[in-house]
Amino acid sequence: MIRFLMLCLFLVTPLWAKPVASVKSTHPTLSKPTQLAATGADFDPENPPERLRVLVALGPSTFFIKNGRQYGVEYSMLTEFEKSLNQGRGKTLPPIRIQFIPVDAGELIPALRAGRGDIAAGLMPVTEGAKQLVAFSTPYLQDRWCTVSATEESRTLTLPASSYAQRLLGDFNDARRRVGANEFEVENAAPGVSSEMLLAQINKGADKTTLVSSFVLGLWGKTLPKLKSISCVEERVPVAWAVRKEDSVLLATLNRFAEKSGLIERAATATKHFLVADGKVQSSEKLGSLDKLAFFAPVFQIVAAANNLDWLLLAAIGQKETGLNSIVRKNGPTGVMQINPSTARNMGVKNPHEAEGNVTAAARYLGHLRDFFNNPGINDEDQLYFMIAAYNAGEGRVQQLRNQAAAQGLDRNRWLGNVEKVALKSVSKGMVDYVSTVSRYYIAYQAAEKARKKHDGASAAAEHK
């Protein structure tokens, strides 16, 4: 059985988990992640931070990974936010990048308050209780909750235990009593079953009724065409993003963006084509052969283990290089990792065109780069950035950029805001984008796996009760 994402590292840093095996010794274990300062409280639209961390609910509507790529309505909206932040910055300034950190929906507000992210996103209803803990943006959606079935409405609603629908049920039953209708009883869904998974079960013929967001129902309408909306709660509930209460400038910036017309509609349109028909995200069961990350996972895992690397780093680079497609060229970069045949030969690989040889050459080269940037003055996070940059442009070029940074009074051992600035001016935006994109995929893969493992553990525990 192929596991979709494995070997996750602890997600306790605000931006990066420890990416690769410790390079300060030959011991193959992982060291404790480096703690980074939160950025949201210092947000200044005139001089913004180069990274904003978004805690995003891992779910089949909000944020999911398919074929190694990131999708979801929150992902779509906030990548549009990223574009708006970069408008007018010019080519000489490093782009502002959003780092998506997927977590369970129930962790959004606690993780935000703990400083693990700057923004929380997850189709979050604005409630009075939550408003005491965080500051919500201008709503980007006014939603309703409706009962859904494939046949007739049942008197029993099947609901995820922690869903917002559980909170609405009391008001819904009050309204039904006033008009002489029967109240609903509640049956809790099995642990780990989301609203989308319930919709998929109903679409396949399950004799169930559930209460779900009207927006989510519309989002899944074409994927699950047998669903029927029967009755809706009259109250419309605002849905918004959240920041810490002290991050007033970031909140104002989000508010201006949230007021854009058609924002949620564009996100829904961009997401509909990629929804997973069973409503699952990162299932622990064997994935279909068409999933590219699942297809390459075994060779990534085997080769990474042999070279003391995290296989998710190989996957992230492969995603950036080729979209996890094996593009074979006789001359020039080849294979899923786009490794040069000359580099492969230097790494002891004779045939870089087939999958295992290609990934092996890339992993050995990354191991070489890890050793190359094994410097007491370079921390683990920056070592990773330099490795990724050198994979793209060569270690010699990165060394030149580090020397130029030192000559300009910048820190040659730091990538963000230092060597990155030199690269942007003297090389091209391409190298900076390459490092940013690979790191974005990598942390998303890691965080999604952490959330999935927690979900699987909870489901297994519930089954043994």
Image (tube, rainbow, N blue to C red):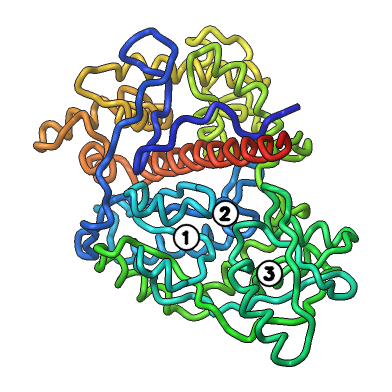
Q: Which mark is residue 121?
A: 1
Name the quadrant containing residue 255: bottom left
- Give how far across and how far down residue 86 sits, in percent: 34, 61
Residue 366 or residue 309, whichever sits in front? 309
Q: Name the residue under label 2.
A: 63
Name which residue type carries label 2. Answer: Phe
Decide which of tag 1 and tag 2 comes sooner along the chain.
2
Mark 2 or 3: in front is 3
**Which residue matches tag 3?**
212
- Residue at 36%, 42% in the rendered image: 15
Instruction: Work out whether 101 lies above or below 398.
Output: below
Residue 319 to residue 234: above or below: above
Amino acid type, mark 1: Ala
From the top left corner, tell me how far across and down residue 360 is, in percent: 57, 16
Query: Residue 407: x percent and y percent?
Result: 10, 32
Q: Say which residue appears at 75% left-offset and 69% top-offset.
A: 185
Q: State the SS at label 1.
A: strand
Cα separation, mark 2 vs mark 3, equals 18 Å
Pointer 1 and pointer 2: residues touching (CB < 8 Å)? yes
Question: Which class describes the residues within 10 Å of circle 2: few (<14), some (14-19), or many (20+)?
Answer: many
